[in-house]
Amino acid sequence: MKTLVDNIDKHLAMSKEDSKAFFDNLYDFLLENEADAVDYQGLKIQSTPPLCPNCHSNNIVKNGKQKGIQNYRCKHCGRQFRVTTGTFVYRLQKPQLMLEYIRCMVAGKSLRACAREVGISLPTSFTWRHKILAALKNFDKNVNFFGIVEIDELLMDYSEKGRKYSSVKEMKQAMRKKPKKVAVIVATDRSGNILFRNTESKRAKREDIDKFLKGRITEDEVLCTGTKYAFRHIRKSKVKHKEIVGAKKKKRGIYSTAIVKAKSEEFARWIYSKFRGVATKYLQNYIMWYVAIGKYLSGGVISNIGRMLNLASSDRFAWYEYFRVSKISYIV
């Protein structure tokens, strides 16, 4: 693993503007230094203390290097691990190709096009995409709402796309059991902040909405919702709640749910037209890709490569999340 910066303290102390410029030029920077995604993961991980992938303790000591990669040992449970363990580059074969794969991905190319251009197989292309998307899942912690907040429910088609059945009997049983729709909670404000949450159930429930809003709005915000039962009983009673009858109706000429409904329709078109639908178990990962595109990946392809790499490298346990979701056969 290469040392990418001479002064790590100076690098970590960069201002917000300097950090943005660094990420925008990160792709060219790594190419100039003949570095790859694993090298950047080693740099990124120094911004936060190492965590044990087994017990999540930060009582960690260095334990030598292996093939140039730093090893650690947890003093709490004794687990030994590398600097890359659990990250999206964990157990990555051909790490030198990951940068080019991210370039194809942020350019909006299909799985087959990415595989063909980078020189990897289609299954590997699928795996790499979903490891990156799994790393974006915690990005929702950066999304909060201010001012007038609109919230609604979006019903998406339930899908087990890609699932293989061992027999016709198993397929018929699954067809009878699986629901037709799955509810997604959608919220947006007038500043452009937007977030979706897959509830993994047929309808959004009261507790789903409370959990979704927790810590994202304050008592000073105004919440606009429809008249569905789950939204009428929002527990955060101190929030100014404006119940709207119909998407086009406005209260006092400003309060409505028109914007959140428009955003919901835009997201649904993105999923169904670009990907021809996605498996429901992966839906939240695609949701966070969509949110990241609007909030973080708003530049050109080259600058977005660095931004996407930085986002993916920020999650210490992306590989485990990818592995967990990949083993789900169906949600029902």
Image (cartoon, rainbow, N blue to C red):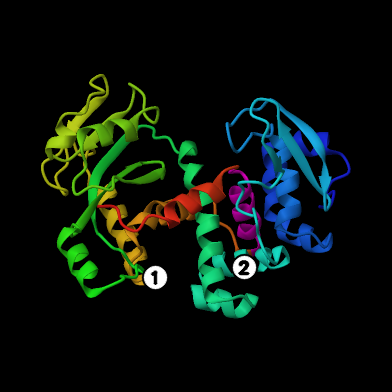
Relative to 230, 270 lies left or right? right
Q: Could you tell me how many numbered marks the image carries?
A: 2
Asked whether residue 195 is in view, the answer is yes
Q: Nearer the viewer, mark 2 or mark 1?
A: 2
Dividing the picture into quarters, in which one does residue 269 lie?
bottom left
User: Farthest top residue?
Assistant: 238
Residue at the far right in the pictured view: 6
Q: Residue at x 85, y 48 (%)?
A: 3
- Few, some or many C-alpha atoms within 10 Å of disc 2 (few <14, some 14-19, many ≥20)? many
Label 2, on which residue? 101
Amino acid type, callout 2: Tyr
Inspect the magenta stretch and tell me whether residue 314 lies in it.
yes
Q: Position of residue 114 (x, y in %)?
A: 56, 74
Residue 41 horizontal side relative to residue 185, left or right: right
Give the labeled residue for mark 1: 274
Looking at the rendering, the stretch of residues picked out in magenta corresponds to 302-315
Query: Is residue 243 covered in magenta?
Result: no
> Please, what secondary structure does the residue beneath circle 1 have?
helix
The answer to whether marks 2 and 1 mark residues whose Cβ atoms lie closer than 8 Å is: no
Q: Is residue 197 left or right of residue 120?
A: left
Q: Identify which amino acid the numbered label 1 is placed on.
A: Lys
User: Residue 126, image x and y in percent?
Assistant: 50, 67
Secondary element at image label 2: helix
> Which of the pair 134/85 is nearer the observer?
85
